[in-house]
Amino acid sequence: MWIVHLLSSSAPQLFSPSAPQPLNPSDLDRSALTALKFGQPGTHEDSRGLQTDSSESLGGVWPRVLVVSRRHLRKGKYVDFVGEYHIDLIQDFGGCPIIVPRTVRTVEQLDAYTFGGVDGVLVMEGQDISDRYNPYGTEVNLQTEELEKVKSKHSSDVEKDDVKDSLEMALIKQKVLEEGVPYLGLCRGSQMLNVAMGGTLYFDVVAETGTTVKHIDYDNYDGHRHPISVLPNTPLSEWFHEEFSGRENESIELSVNSYHHQGIKKLAPGLEPLCHSLDGLLEGYYDPKFFDPENGRFRVGLQWHPERMMDDYVGCARVYQDFIRAASRHKELRMQRARGRLVSGMGSRAETQQQMVR
């Protein structure tokens, strides 16, 4: 009886294809998002007098977005964390972040976290990728002395986290590349997908290219910006369409944050550029075959951090909005397939029972 009720028009919403209504980033500023962050339901008014109903993001079907935590040493003990910038934006636009702890045991338990379904994978900042994935191609073309200088200057980054790498690479290969789960890679996350798909990285951008563009500033970590050139007629130009007003077929510049000493050297097959820094370094890409948010496809890598630039450009929020829109649609399609399998299974069982009766 329960299964019959589940498939009827009055069934509970377990298999409902209706997705949560995404918020419009152009209608929000940080004061409204802060109200949402602290769980205050109802209508909120931002500094421009615009009203936002936070209950919009509370209904419907929550797409599950997996995020692997980072490890941090605090008071002599390790703690796992995920920055609330990311969690807030996933939730603000109607997604449900599933935090996967980066522990050794999680590697063998990963199926338990993916069992409920995966509708999005977010990989962001962290340490340099483990050598086991051959991120630099054949070899790093630097002398020992130069290597040691890089390791000394970026000591916290050059440390490896093999467990985090293993978990994220498993999600990328098993869910993103094999099943087409929507993917957003930021900073290190853009490098991870590129390596997984056959691309390579610079071990150190400055040491290998001699660039004078400052891609990381330890003295002005959050405030530092550098210009990038955004290619027209790309998803990035659509997210930042205000900046292209009157120049729709030209490249335009954005000023973005930057926290990296490595970067993409060879872009993996199938990926296309979105933007470059003025020294020619790739700062963003997408997979055109897997970019259609309305139909559940999203595969984007950005070397910079839109989640930390919400006050700079409205387009920064649109990156997450389209990511969660794709994740929501992915869940709808996943539920439809599950419902189809259930109906098919019921039909096969009924046919078998009829044959047994005969």
Image: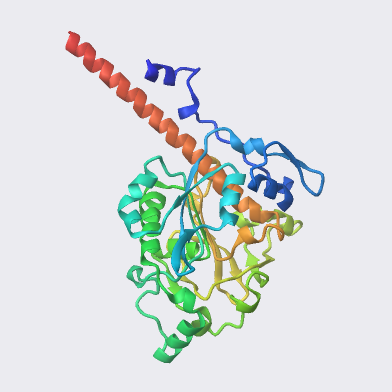
- Residue at the top extreme, as displayed: 358
| The N terminus lies in quadrant | top left
Residue ID at (51%, 64%)? 125
In this rendering, the answer to whether 180 lies above or below 352 is below
How far across and down, in percent of the image, does residue 50 sit?
Answer: 78, 43
- Residue at the front extreme, as displayed: 75
- In screen coordinates, is 160 left or right of 20? left
Query: Which of the pair 321/223 is nearer the observer?
Result: 223
Tag count: 0
Residue ID at (36%, 66%)? 162
Residue ID at (45%, 72%)? 201
Q: Quadrant of residue 243?
A: bottom right
- Residue at the bottom extreme, as displayed: 145
> Could one spot residue 188 in this view of the protein?
yes
- Residue at the right extreme, as displayed: 49
How far across and down, in percent of the image, does residue 35 sit?
Answer: 69, 46
> Could one spot residue 29 in this view of the protein?
no
- In screen coordinates, is 341 left or right of 239? left
In this rendering, the answer to whether 316 lies above or below 138 is above
- In screen coordinates, is 152 left or right of 224? left
Residue ID at (33%, 47%)? 111
How far across and down, in percent of the image, does residue 216 sit?
Answer: 59, 76
| The C terminus lies in quadrant | top left
Q: Quadrant of residue 105?
A: bottom left
Tell me which colouring the rendered structure shows. Answer: rainbow
How far across and down, in percent of the image, does residue 186 sit?
Answer: 53, 61
